[in-house]
């Protein structure tokens, strides 16, 4: 089931390489905190099932912290690393996540004509960065941050927005391997194509705004400053 608020048309024209929507048609969030509070309203019905809110690091954790606070439920982090194209790292070929999950866009890989060796090199690089992030955000040994138990529970996976949906796909599969009984995907804004591709992976999808043309996730925020790893740790500890 998909819950969404569609406000206004998404008629856009390019202006110096950036979208310019007609007055009143842009639905913007002030920042990730505002997005989280508005998303929490749509997730209120899930409070009774005792879910765990899981934010995709890094930006998704800021949104998730507001939802976890509103629903008064535990928060955890999904650590994911995008697999970027060789000459354009922002172009996602896929993503890797904890529990050995790899999610690839076969269409993107074929379109770039990557050899098996080149793809393996990109995967190895992404997995090394994933390991670094896991160590940074979860720690090691006696000081390690314990995983919030998901077995038999509903996990609400939250990111700050979806463009391709590949990172969310990897994160959802990781939550399944951790034992989540139900996975609800919840985001403030998303491309329609990304949501369509993820419907088979989630029991429910909740989205505040689905524009016809996404352009970029950051376009829908007045403040989309990067979230640091230090901030992620503070959100997880309840310090922000």
Image (cartoon, rainbow, N blue to C red):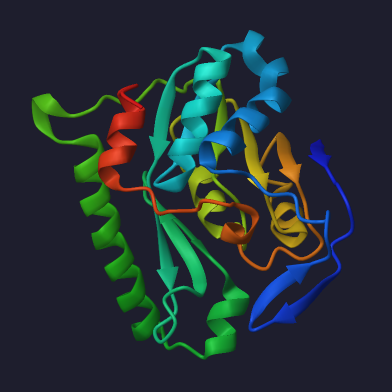
Q: Position of residue 205 (x, y in %)?
A: 72, 38
Q: Quick one: which residue is furthest to the front in this view? A: 23
Q: Is residue 96 left or right of residue 165?
A: left
| Camera-nearest residue between 222 and 185 | 222
Q: Is residue 2 above or below residue 220?
A: above
Q: Is residue 156 above or below residue 134?
A: above
From the image, which quarter does the C terminus lie in? top left
Q: Position of residue 94 (x, y in %)?
A: 50, 66
Q: Is residue 176 visible?
A: no
Q: Is residue 41 above or below residue 20?
A: above
Q: Position of residue 202 (x, y in %)?
A: 67, 39
Residue 49 image-quadrant placement: top right
| Camera-nearest residue between 114 and 88 | 88
Residue 89 image-quadrant placement: bottom left
| Camera-nearest residue between 86 and 124 | 86
From the image, which quarter does the N terminus lie in? top right
Q: Position of residue 76 (x, y in %)?
A: 40, 29
Q: Is residue 188 left or right of residue 109?
A: right
| Camera-nearest residue between 101 and 90 | 90
Q: Quick one: which residue is furthest to the right in this view? A: 9
Q: Is residue 72 left or right of residue 130?
A: right
Q: Residue at x 74, y 47 (%)?
A: 199
Q: Residue at x 58, y 35 (%)?
A: 34
Q: Quick one: which residue is furthest to the left in this view? A: 142
Q: Is residue 131 visible?
A: yes
Residue 79 image-quadrant placement: top left
Q: Quick one: which residue is furthest to the top in this view? A: 48
Q: Is residue 157 above or below residue 128?
A: above
């Amino acid at each position: 089931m998909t819950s969404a608020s569609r406000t206004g048309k998404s008629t856009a024209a390019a202006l110096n390489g950036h979208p310019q929507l007609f007055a009143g048609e842009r639905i913007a969030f002030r920042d990730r905190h505002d997005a989280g509070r508005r998303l929490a309203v749509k997730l209120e019905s899930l409070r009774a099932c005792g879910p765990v809110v899981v934010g995709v690091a890094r930006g998704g954790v800021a949104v998730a912290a507001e939802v976890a606070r509103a629903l008064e439920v535990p928060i955890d982090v999904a650590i994911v690393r995008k697999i970027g194209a060789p000459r354009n790292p922002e172009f996602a070929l896929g993503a890797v996540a904890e529990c050995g999950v790899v999610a690839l866009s076969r269409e993107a890989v074929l379109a770039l004509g990557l050899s098996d060796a080149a793809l393996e090199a990109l995967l190895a690089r992404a997995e090394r960065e994933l390991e670094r992030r896991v160590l940074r955000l979860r720690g090691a040994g006696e000081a390690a941050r314990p995983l919030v138990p998901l077995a038999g529970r509903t996990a609400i996976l939250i990111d700050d927005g979806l463009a391709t949906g590949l990172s969310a796909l990897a994160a959802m599969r990781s939550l399944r391997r951790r034992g989540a009984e139900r996975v609800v995907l919840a985001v403030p804004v998303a491309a329609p194509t990304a949501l369509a591709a993820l419907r088979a992976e989630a029991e429910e999808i909740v989205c505040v705004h689905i524009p016809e043309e996404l352009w970029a996730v950051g376009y829908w925020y007045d403040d989309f400053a990067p979230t640091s790893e230090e901030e992620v740790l503070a959100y997880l500890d309840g310090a922000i």
